[in-house]
Image (tube, helix red, strand yellow):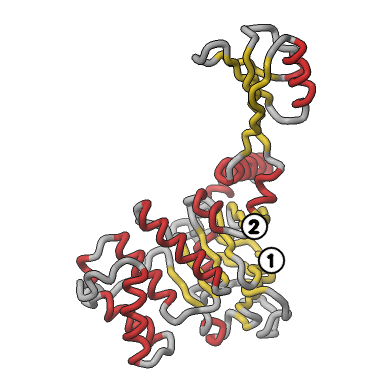
Amino acid sequence: MIDRPAADRGPHGSAAVRTAGLAKSYRHPWTGRLVQGLHPLDFEVRRGEVMGYLGPNGAGKTTTLKLLTGLLKPTAGAGWLFDVSIDQVASRRSLGFLPEQPYFYEYLNGVEYLELAGRLSGLGAHDATRRATRWLGRVGLGDRPRLVLRKYSKGMLQRLGLAAALIHEPELLILDEPMSGLDPFGRRDVRDLILEQRARGTTVLFSSHILPDVEILCDRVAIVLHGRLTRVATVGELVSDSCQQVEIRCTGIDAIAVPPELGAVLTRLDRPCETVFTLADDARLNEAVAWLMRAGATVRAVTPQRATLEDLFLATAEAEDRSRHGVDGVERGADTRRSA
């Protein structure tokens, strides 16, 4: 029995995507046990933003995206795309979707495939052909428009799938691992496409394991672990207060005893007379600089070492694992991680 609100329309506002208690459970194929693939999710993506949806394999990312696009039915809760219930076909009229493993008709060529995608999205025949040719060139495949898809590489197919998701110029773009199978040039092209879509006002929600790309592209990120949403924040909010270490480069001192209360480490470099004084954080930076100067050092540079998004994601995931194993036990965690 599906438990969800009766209303087909969500609360009006600035959200392109909104969920209320959206959840998915299923029976384990071997044990028959009920597994909660996605715990009740309250979540929104604002109109016009690029949001990264992050999590390790099996965290629930693909499950969430399939629920939003109508490929899976929720067992509880509700969701809306531009205030139209995800139960309704109308919710997908302004949607472009690239699944993690898209299906391609191998006997078609690139133009034919994009023409088909355009017609299925409601474009007329002439418009679909015109856009197919343009988008094939836009994703770097225009030099061989009649090459059949069975001869495409994985990276070429990924580019084609992205073009198919964009051919009807959707208001909302949902991408599941869009960088998968791409070389550095392909990743750059996809980043440029996403930024181009943001500039024209398109809302973008995408999952990715390539965190440097997420850090470049996203206005906000959501972190999901073991089927639970654990944090939503801007990239700036995540990294602004995450000073891991401070390096003070100085000259004029050799190996001297560091006051233990500073919790610092001195490292002698190969450069003549240059030493790096490393603090665990910036809490006692002023005190450390004053102590070095009293010791006869000349301070050359003070450099905070900020955590990257990847550092923060790994730390969050490890903390969640420790918490789960301490409270729920290992077996429950292992079952939940089987969700996509």
Up/down of 37 relative to 87, above or below: above
Separation of residues labelled 1 and 2 (CA atoms): 8 Å
- Left/right placement of residue 206 relative to residue 319 reads left
Find residue 229 and name its label.
2
Q: Look at the numbered discs 1 and 2 and tell me whether their residues touch, using CB distance below 8 Å.
A: yes
SS of the residue at dot 1? Answer: strand
- Could you tell me which residue is drawn at 57 percent across and 65 percent down? 25
**328 or 190, which lies in front?**
190
Up/down of 270 relative to 118, above or below: above
**Quadrant in the rendering for residue 136:** bottom left
How far from the left and from the top, in percent, is residue 255?
62, 7
Viewer can see residue 92: yes
**Quadrant in the rendering for residue 141:** bottom left
At label 1, the amino acid type is Asp
- Left/right placement of residue 126 relative to residue 97 reads left
Up/down of 201 relative to 152, above or below: below
SS of the residue at dot 2? Answer: strand
Viewer can see residue 57: no
How far from the left and from the top, in percent, is residue 52?
56, 59
Up/down of 334 relative to 21, above or below: above
Find residue 42 and name its label.
1
- Give neighbour class at mark 1: few <14, some 14-19, many 20+ (Cα, 10 Å): some
- Could you tell me which residue is drawn at 34 percent across and 77 percent down? 134
**Quadrant in the rendering for residue 329:** top right
